[in-house]
Amino acid sequence: MSRNHTLFERARHSIPGGVNSPVRAFGSVGGTPIFFQRGQGASLWDADNTQYIDYVGSWGPAIVGHAHPEVIAAVQAAAVNGLSFGAPTEAEILIAEEIIKLVPSIESVRLVSSGTEATMSAIRLARGFTGRDKIVKFEGCYHGHSDSLLVKAGSGLLTFGTPSSGGVPADFTRHTLVLEYNNVEQLTQTFAELGDQLACVILEPFAGNMNLIRPSAEFVAALRELCTRHGAVLIYDEVMTGFRVALGGAQELHGIRPDLTTLGKVVGGGMPIGAFGGRADIMACIAPLGSVYQAGTLSGNPVAVAAGLTTLKLIQAEGFHARLGERTRQLVDGLAAAAREAGVTCSTDSVGGMFGLYFTAEVPRSYAEVMQSDRELFNRFFHAMLAEGVYLAPSAFEAGFVSAAHTEADIDATVAAARRAFAKLAA
Ligand SMILES: *Cc1c(COP(=O)(O)O)cnc(C)c1O
């Protein structure tokens, strides 16, 4: 029996489902989760010391590769000075200044310890700032696991959402309206009816939690225009896209200035950091300046900040994102060609260091379209690739991630593995 099996059996006795975050359990793809013991660059080694080329990258943070020597050195140097003080440190100013420099719509920023905290706090802030309760989110977008954001679409147009998790009172999601991604007409109609009651609209500016879905230019333009006209706060949830699709995030690519932005993943460089920031007049509503309460014992933790700050420095290397985008494009083009050769129906897309692989004829543009993809085929592909030593996200509905440590040889090896995996699928 493999050590992964043994560890998973043992984990299930002390940890619910054997994991500390549900998708890790391989529930949708089946089989035994891989327990990792080590990462270096683009590779991971599991409990049996089997090596994998990694396209999960800790779900995004590992943009410079695993265990980058400069990041590790910064963490070690910070750690010997003490792990946490619950008081301000100079490094927090440095990372705040760096974030503000890279994301111009952010005039002021607060650090938290996860993406969930960042989005939850940004929503509370938008409500406090506007004095309104209702919020809009889009079907298939994930914004962390706070109560009012764990919502699925209601049954009809302009109905408020129902909780998508046990333990969330329907009363808590009563103010959350769930609309279709990329549906400009529905968005416009919603604002016409309820615009002056909306505190905010939150979106993933490239959705990465229902595979990868791009917004249309009309959709983002309508969002900005309608929020401005009706005094609703536009929140770009860039926890995944921030520093990954471009140095200035999705908003740089869209040419849109959101009112608030949430960050996570890359900003912590693999350590627990989230952040929310934006317009100074809105941020001034946060305690201790304003009445909207938000706090954290470990917020701005010096060891985490050291990892984040070093990562933000590394991604500013000349041509970093151009190279990352090019590498990612090579990967998806290679995967698409391999699928074609084998006669497997499959489409691909990428933006910066983020990619989508869909078992659909066309690249999907909404949650409903992505749900049409052939899950069974994906699951077989996932396991065939795993057997080839390629670690993909264990779900048909997650984006993939490439890091600066992925070499051309890694991409070539992955495409060669995919050719064999697709051939197996077609057989
Ligand atoms: C990952 C993610 C979150 C939640 O971040 P956690 O650090 O897992 O709490 C929120 N929003 C988006 C877009 C994400 O991808």
Image: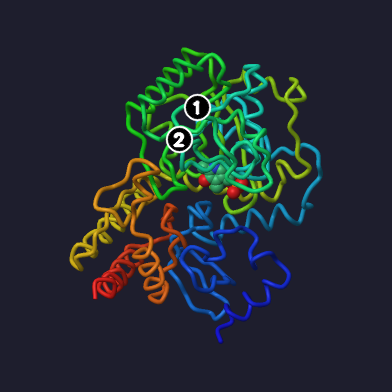
Q: Secondary structure at mark 2?
A: loop
Q: Position of residue 318 (x, y in %)?
A: 40, 44
Q: Position of residue 274 (x, y in %)?
A: 62, 42
Q: From the image, which quarter does the N terminus lie in?
A: bottom right
Q: Is residue 332 left or right of residue 34?
A: left
Residue identifier under label 2: 248
Give the mark, 1 or 2, whose residue is nearer the N terminus: 1
Q: Nearer the viewer, residue 84 or 332?
A: 332
Amino acid identity at mark 1: Pro
Figure quadrant, ligand 1: top right
Where residue 340 sits, quadrant-wise, is bottom left
Amino acid identity at mark 2: Gly
Q: Is residue 308 visible?
A: no
Q: From the image, which quarter does the C terminus lie in?
A: bottom left
Q: Position of residue 95 (x, y in %)?
A: 62, 38
Residue identifier under label 1: 104
Q: Is residue 170 above or below residue 31?
A: above
Kindly identify the residue that appears in the image at 37 percent across and 23 percent down: 221
Q: Is residue 106 above or below residue 111?
A: above
Q: Residues within 10 Å of mark 1 (few under 14, many from 20)?
A: some
Contact, mark 1 vs mark 2 (Cβ under 8 Å): yes
Q: Residues within 10 Å of mark 2 (few under 14, many from 20)?
A: some
